[in-house]
Amino acid sequence: MKRPVCIIMLILLWVSGFSQVGKLKISPVVPADSLIKFSKQHLGTRYHYANCTPAEGFDCSGFVYFVFSHFNIKVPRSSSDYANFGKPVPMDSARVGDVIVFTGTDAKRRKPGHVGIVISKPGEELLFIHSSSDKRNSGIKISNYTASPNYKKRFLKIVRVAVVN
């Protein structure tokens, strides 16, 4: 009974017209402080592949999906679907609520494989919250893009998926 919730949510999203991946629909406005507070409530929750619940743990896209679903915003459940989703924004314009997209662990394979949520403002060091599978420090954590050579070489893009003020 590990994946039924995710499967049911995916079916409901598909039925409701989510199959138009890549088209940014105007979503409810989310206060930035509410998004940060809600996502930080899950710091330390364990990493669990292919899951999107606090009780079982999260993979990266499951966490992003869970956070945005809390605010009634539809985003992809799979990191690979971010290849054609959202509105690309320059790194120096990234703001709270944008999704940062990376390759998977193999930086040579230039396809989305990891995602997180930006929690910093333009002009600040780029911080993001995500579910990491890092063997030494897995689970929901905050990472500093600038301080990580690993994330720099895996970076693909940043996309805006919602109106966050």
Image: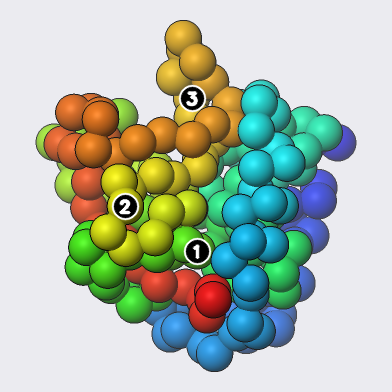
Q: Position of residue 86 (x, y in %)?
A: 39, 74
Q: Relative to residue 37, is residue 91 depicted above or below? A: below
Determine crowd level at label 1: few under 14, some 14-19, many 20+ residues with C-alpha closer than 10 A: many
Where does the N terminus fall, quadrant-wise?
Answer: top right
Q: Are marks 2 and 1 in contact (CB under 8 Å)?
A: no
Q: Earlier in the sequence, mark 2 or mark 3?
A: 2
Q: Are marks 2 and 3 in contact (CB under 8 Å)?
A: no
> Which mark, by number, is residue 133?
3
Q: Disc 2 or disc 3, which is closer to the eye?
A: 2
Name the residue located 43 percent from the left edge and 85 percent from the top edge: 23
Q: Earlier in the sequence, mark 2 or mark 1?
A: 1
Name the residue located 34 percent from the left edge and 77 percent from the top edge: 87
Q: Secondary structure at mark 1?
A: loop
Q: Position of residue 52 (x, y in %)?
A: 69, 45
Q: CA distance from mark 1 to mark 3?
A: 21 Å
> Which mark, by number, is residue 97?
1
- Residue 82: in sight, yes or no? no
Asked where in the image residue 12 lies, by quadrant, the reply is bottom right
